Image (cartoon, rainbow, N blue to C red):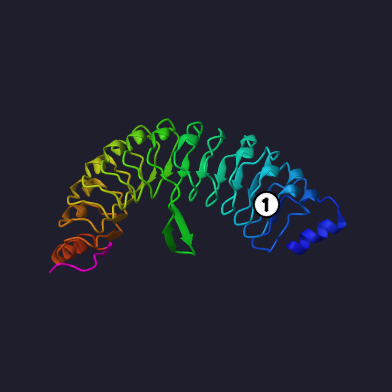
Amino acid sequence: MSKYLNLIISTKITQPHIKNFNAIASNLNTLDGLQYLPNLEKAVFSGNNIEQLTPLKNCIKLIELDLSNNRLTDIKDLINLSLMEGLNLSNNPINNIECLESLKYLKSLKIRYCQLYNIEKLKLFNLNFLDVTGNYLDNLNFIKPLLNLKTLNISNIKSYGTNELGYFNRNNISEISQLENLINLKEIRLNVGSIDNLQPLSNLYNLEVLEFWTNKIIDLKPISDLIKLKKIDFGDNLISNLDAFSNLHNLEEVNLTGNEIKDIEPLKNLRKLKKLSIGFNKIENIEYLRTCKNLKTLNCFGNNIKAEKIEILKRELPECKINAGFLIK
């Protein structure tokens, strides 16, 4: 692909017919040549060694652009790409994104694992997807103007290859009151933080996915009326009471691993539940789960459940794979 760019440079002939360009991991050090592609609409340059974006200035018709995993520090050359709807700048040492404010049509922005400390000037009113995982943010004030946001991911997670995960001590979010007016939100991921109060979520009735694992949450009552919820992950918190689950009939996947739970009776009405993880709690009785006929996977290791109770549940739910670990005889 770099040879193709070199050909464009050497001929210096405008290529108006080219609308898509893909150069993933192509050992590119420069984007020279793109200035001759005025009608470019979609481009992927992930996994290269690109440091500056000057050739993109002429690509004013760009709609989607992926520049993840490069060496960018300055993105000011994106300022005139006003038609942009999707932008991925993840894994670059970027510390300033103020120029993106001119991208009024931007709907999706991924800026994972950059060097961002403050993005409060990010007033992109059409944004509906934002991923700022692995930066250095300590509050959510930048969220307030983003009233059309549907998906928010701001976690302290670092990927080491395909499957391994580690924690960043970067984002230090403890307060989520800034979310209370974002009524269009469908997905929130705020993993690994210091959050202990979910009350600001109580009126976000469009929520379908909540991930708050490794926080300091005790009380789930604020989410008890969010009946559109399909997936919940509150692993590694301080939860002991599950009464909030009684009305959440659309839940399909629940993770409550590593809490203080003894009683799981409120889960008995979750007839759509397909996957449940309740490992490393204080649970002894799992008979209430026999009414969850759609359950396909149950992780309940690290509790005080007797082997005979597991066997009974296996007979009640023959299609469910039960991972119980070491059992009490």
Residue beneath the point at 23% across and 48% down? 267
Instruction: Indicate the position of residue 237 as horizontal and vertical percent values.
Output: 29, 49
Q: Quadrant of the N terminus?
A: bottom right
Foreground residue among 315 and 183:
183
Q: Quadrant of residue 103?
A: top right
323 within the magenta span: yes
Residue assigned mark 1: 43
Disc 1, SS = strand
Q: Quadrant of residue 183?
A: top left
Q: Position of residue 32 (x, y in %)?
A: 77, 54
Q: Please state which of residues 15 and 11 is positioned toward the viewer in this rendering.
A: 11
Look at the picture and state if 158 lies above or below 232.
Answer: below
* Extent of the magenta region: 319-329
Residue drawn at 62 percent across, 60 percent down: 47
Is 151 drawn above or below residue 306 in the view shown? above
> What amino acid is labelled 1 in the image?
Ala
Q: Nearer the viewer, residue 283 or 119?
A: 119
**Would you say the magenta stretch is mainly helix, strand or loop?**
loop
Q: Is residue 70 above or below residue 106?
A: below
* Residue lying at 62% horizontally and 39% vertically, measured from the top left: 100
Please give the count of numbered marks on the rendered protein: 1
Is residue 127 magenta-colored? no
Q: Position of residue 329 (x, y in %)?
A: 12, 69
